[in-house]
Every structure is written in structure tokens, then in C-alpha cells.
Amino acid sequence: MNTLASPTGLSVASLRHSVSDPQQDRRHEHHVSEKSAAWCLTTFTGRLTELSGEPSGASLSLVFGLVLEAQKQAEPVAWITSRASTFFPPDAAERGIDLAALAVVRTGDLLKTAGAAEHLLRSAAFGLLVLDLGTDSRMPLPVQARLAGQARHHETALVCLTEKPAKDPSLGSMVSLRAHARKVQQQGRRFRCRIRILKDKQRGPGWSHMEVGRGPDGLC
């Protein structure tokens, strides 16, 4: 596993006390509306979730909202990716995310990404782990089972980001919740993201969520 990278050099144990500045919280107010009661960090806590989407940025926008919610609750967040490129930090900062408190781990492939996630889950120090898998979604069932079990045991929200159409199957049977996001409207810098719940072992599928966002400067 690659070394966990944090701009401030915070240890895993100390990350739980890293929170965003109140002024950053206020910057997020104009980004979200029509927030459903079900679309919140509590819904994903203790579960293996897959959030899929087309390469439009809708899924990133939605998971940024969960990252910010976790930071407001003083819950450390780690972003784990095997991709050469990941989210654009200025976009995350625009959403009000405290980048200094967001641990980023880069790995070589999906299995190393899963291994890094299992290591961090076992630390019991994180409230939210985001696995940015891109188009690589070939996660073996035993690996999924270990991750799902650790997420449940330590009450951690484990969200896998994948890039694929809604009609494609989920990562596997251990996924507790599968959601698919897409942009449905954009006008200048403002856009709407709609998410459909395709699978939910607790509530049942079929519910949806709408979020209104504002892109960074220069987006048109």
C-alpha cells in the first residue's frame, strides 16, 4: 500500500479531530437544495455502497456533499484511488471541503486500493472512505465481503465510485446500496444532479435524490 498522504502530515489517530472551518461550511450553503432525508451520511454508515455515473462529474459532486457532511461531524475522511488522476482539488475546496483534513491514498490497481481500504477500515479512525475505482470494477467477492464486514463492524461509510451506465451490474452481491447519478440540467455554472437508487437492501430500491450545484469559475 502506498503511504497515506495528508498535506498536514496528520496521523490516522489525530485525523478524527480535524474539522473544516465554519467559514467553509457557509460557502457550501448555495450548493445543495432538495436534499432528501435519506441522502445523508447516516444512510451509508456501516455499508458498502456503489455510486456509479457517466463521466459527467455528477457522482463526484454528490460524494463531495458526503465528504463535507462527514467533516462537519468531525469524522475523518480518506479518498483512495488507483487512477492516475482523481478529483480536482480546487473544485473540492469550492464546495467547502477542508483539503488539509482529507487523506488521499494513491495505489497501483484495484486490489491494492481494496487493500488500502481494508487497512484504514481496521484502524477504526475514519467515518467515510471513498474508493475511486473509475472503470475498473472487477472486485472479487471475498474482497468485497471483507470490506463490507469491516465497514459494518467499525460503522464506517464505504462508498465506491465507478464509471459505467446504470444498466451495468453492480460490483457484486456484497454491495448494500447501488446508486446511479447523472446531470439532468445545466445552465451556465448551475446544474442539477439526479440520483436513482437501483439497489438498497435496507429501504428497498426506487427512491431518488436531487441536488443543485454550482460549478467552479470558467465552467460553461
Image: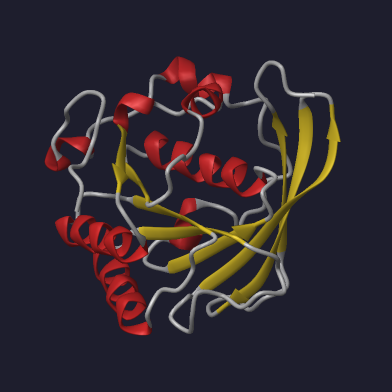
- Colour basis: secondary structure
Q: Name which quarter of the figure residue 78 lies in.
A: top left
Q: Is residue 142 above or below residue 154?
A: below
At which x and y percent is residue 6?
Answer: 24, 31
Q: Residue at x 61, y 76 (%)?
A: 199
Left or right for 86, reference 54: left
Left or right for 199, reference 44: right
Q: Name which quarter of the figure residue 211 lies in.
A: top right
Front residue (pair 194, 136):
136
Q: Residue at x 43, y 48 (%)?
A: 83
Left or right for 123, reference 73: left
Q: Is residue 133 above or below residue 69?
A: below
Q: Residue at x 66, y 68 (%)?
A: 197
* Image quarter of the C terminus: top right
Q: Residue at x 24, y 63 (%)?
A: 115
Front residue (pair 56, 82):
82
At which x and y percent is residue 175?
Answer: 47, 75
Left or right for 132, reference 218: left
Front residue (pair 63, 104):
104
Q: Is residue 219 above or below residue 147?
A: above
Q: Name which quarter of the figure residue 3 lies in.
A: top left
At which x and y percent is residue 7?
Answer: 26, 25
At which x and y percent is residue 49?
Answer: 48, 66
Front residue (pair 27, 73):
27
Q: Is residue 14 above or below residue 100?
A: below
